[in-house]
Amino acid sequence: PELMLGRFPESSLLEERAVILSRLNEHKEALALYVWDLDKLDEALQYCKDSYDADDKGKRHVYLQLLYVLIQPDSLEPTTARLQAKPKIDEALNVLSDHYTRIDLATAFEILPEEMDIQKVFPLLQAVLSYNKTRSRRNKVTRSLYRIENLRVRSEFISTRSKQVRIDTLTKCYYCSRRIGNAAFV
């Protein structure tokens, strides 16, 4: 992929270039191509959806990189479309409100401009707080269910352990129905 990237023209075949960049895990540059050079935010969102993997360190922050591309276009490699670009704050807030469960919110709020009106962020904060409250309640219920299951298993263990089996000369084997008597078990 690295060889192919060097052979691609900088100003054409942009979607193909984005695919190659994604194979190289250059997510920010691929997203910048979709957002600024191709002006296709929906494809950038689809790219994030396809690339996101919570377990992969390189793909865990794809949505955060999309926010970075939307909010700070002047920090990217300059192209004709990016030089005149103004931050797409409303689009970034929409991405943030739709995918906040997949984004590190502390870092996302650091990326947002300081002079942003709190009224724009307020619905997002309400949704995040509601989600965290619901998740906290669900975790408490799950923890209680596990605690109850643990107590049930312990109780069953204690009752099973306290049972005694008495074997005399007339006791028969459960499987073969022969008398045990003084026979040795192998």
Image: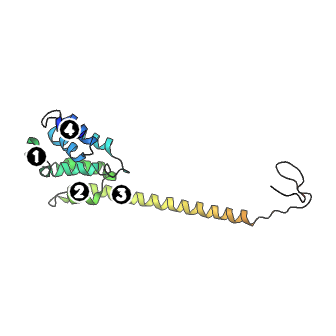
Disc 2 and disc 1: Cα gap in Å? Answer: 29 Å
- The total of numbered circles placed on residues is 4
| Residue type indicated by callout 3 | Ser
- Residue farthest along the front direction in this orientation: 3
Q: State the residue in front, 109 or 126.
A: 109
| Mark 1 lies on residue | 78
For marks 1 and 4, the one nearer the N-term is 4
With 71 as the anchor, is 24 left or right in this view? Answer: right
Q: Quadrant of residue 10?
A: top left
Secondary element under disc 3, as helix, strand or loop, is: helix
Quadrant occupied by the N terminus: top left
Q: Residues within 10 Å of mark 4 (few under 14, many from 20)?
A: some
Q: Quadrant of residue 20?
A: top left
| Residue type indicated by callout 2 | Val
Q: Do the residues bearing badges 4 and 3 touch, measured as CB atoms within 8 Å?
A: no
For marks 2 and 4, the one nearer the N-term is 4
- Residue farthest along the top direction in this orientation: 13
| Mark 2 lies on residue | 121
For marks 1 and 3, the one nearer the N-term is 1
Whole-percent x, y for residue 17 in the image = 20, 37
Q: Is residue 74 visible?
A: yes
Using the image, tell me which numbered label, if any, was put on residue 130. 3
Whole-percent x, y for residue 99 in the image = 31, 49
For marks 4 and 3, the one nearer the N-term is 4
The mark closer to the camera, 2 or 1, is 1
| Mark 4 lies on residue | 5
Disc 1 and disc 4: Cα gap in Å? Answer: 17 Å
The mark closer to the camera, 1 or 4, is 4
